[in-house]
Image (spheres, rainbow, N blue to C red):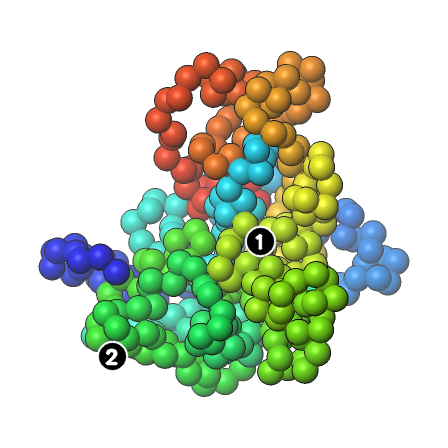
Amino acid sequence: MGSISRRLFLGTSAAALAVAASGILPALAAAATGEAPMLKALVDAGTLPALADRLPLNPMVVTPLREVGKYGGTWRSTIVGGGSLSMLFRYQAYEPLMRYNPEWTGVIPNVAESVVANDTATEFTFKLREGHKWSDGHPYTTEDVMFWYEDVFSNPEIEVTNQDHLIIGDDKGVFTKIDDLTFKVSFKNSNGLFLLLLAWADSDQTTRFPKHYLSRFLPKYNPDADKLATDQGLSGWVQLFQKKSGAALEDDFFLNSEIPVLHPWKMKVAPGESTEHAIAERNPYYFKVDTAGNQLPYLDSIDYVLVADAQVLLLKCLQGRSICSTSISARRPTSRCCSMARSRVATTSTPRSLPSPTRWRSAST
C-alpha cells in the first residue's frame, strides 16, 4: 500500500470508523410484498419459494433517487472488443460488504448488516444478514467468507488480485469466525483505510466465493479436482479454479454463467458462450428492497451486445440493431450509444471518470 500523509490517514480513519461509531445501519424493512411478475409466476407454479423465504430477515432498504420504480424491461447495453469485463463490477455487480453512500462522504454496510471497529482500527467485526442467500438459494454465511480466506487468499498456489486493503507492510489481515453470521478481521497495526478500500468496486472477494460451488474445484474437498481440470483440457486444478472463480483475473468471473452470485443480476449467457450477446437475468434471491417493500431490481435483465470495436458499434446503432443506455468498454463507459460511438471513432479524447455505482444502484435497481 502506498504511503499517505498523516492528515489524510486520520481523516479517512475517522470516516471509516464513523460507520461503527454512529450506528449506521440499513433501515429495518417493512413486510416486503412486492416482487417481479416473472418471479411471482414461478412462485405460483411452485418452482420458486415465496418472497419471504427468499429475502434475508433484515433486507437492505434502498431509497429511490426520484421515485419507486416499476417492474419489467431490459437494459440494453454493449461490451466493445471484449472490453474490460471487470467494469461490470461497477454496473451489474457492485455488492461488497461495505459500499459508498450516495454522497461519497463515507461508507455504509451493504452485504454486511453491520460492522464495529475498535478505537485503534486494528479489529473490525462484521455481522452478516440472517437468511441471506446466493442466487441459487444456498445460504450465504461466514462459511463462505472463511472458505475464501483459508482456502483461497491464504493458499500460496492460488493467485488473487486487488487485495491490498488486507496488507499492512509485510503483515496480512487475519480472519476469525465467531459464529455463522459473525466474523472478525484483525491487523497487527492500525488500518484506518480498511473499510474505505473494502468498499471499492472490485476489491472485496469475500462476497464472490460460494463455498458450495467452488470447493469442488479444490483437491482439499475433491480428490478428483485435477482430473476434472484435465478432462476440460486444462493443466490442473489451479487453472480450473482460477477460471471458475476469477480470483486472479476478474474478467473470468463474468465468463462463468454457473457461479452463484449475490448481485441483482446473474449471467445467464456469459460473454464467450455466444458471439452476439451476453445476457444477465434478475437474481430471485437479491437482498434489497425499495421503500415500498418491493424486492429489487426493477429491470428483468441486461442484454449486452458484443461488438468487435467502436466502428461496429456505430454501424449497429445506425442500423437500429443496438439500443443502449451505456456502452461499456475497456476505455470508457458512455451514454447515448450512437453519438458516443461516433466520438470514439473520430477522437481519442481522455476517458471520463466512472459514474458513481451507488447513484446508479439507487436510480436503476
Residue 236 versus residue 222 in the image, above or below: above
Specify the amino acid type for callout 1.
Asp
In the rendered image, residue 33, in percent from the top left (x then y), is placed at 68, 56
**Earlier along the polypeptide chain: callout 1 or callout 2?**
2
Q: Secondary structure under badge 2?
A: loop
Characterize the local packing of mark 2: few (<14), some (14-19) or many (20 or more) Cα atoms within 10 angstroms.
few
Kindly identify the amino acid type of the residue bearing the numbered disc 2.
Lys
Between circles 1 and 2, the one closer to the viewer is: 1
Residue found farthest to the right: 45
Q: Determine the residue positioned at 73% across, 41% down.
A: 274
Quadrant the N terminus occupies: bottom left
Residue at mark 2: 188
Who's the residue at 71% across and 70% down the image? 228
Q: Which of 30 and 332 is in front in this view?
A: 332
Quarter assignment of residue 161: bottom left
| Residue under the point 60% across and 83% down | 220
Locate residue 168 relative to residue 260 in the image: left or right.
Answer: left
User: Which dot marks residue 252?
Assistant: 1
- In contact (CB < 8 Å): disc 1 and disc 2: no
Q: How crowded is mark 1: few (under 14 residues within 10 Å), some or many (20 or more)?
A: some
Q: Nearer the viewer, residue 351 or 275?
A: 275
Quadrant, the C terminus: top right
Considering depth in this image, is 283 or 219 the residue closer to the camera?
Answer: 219
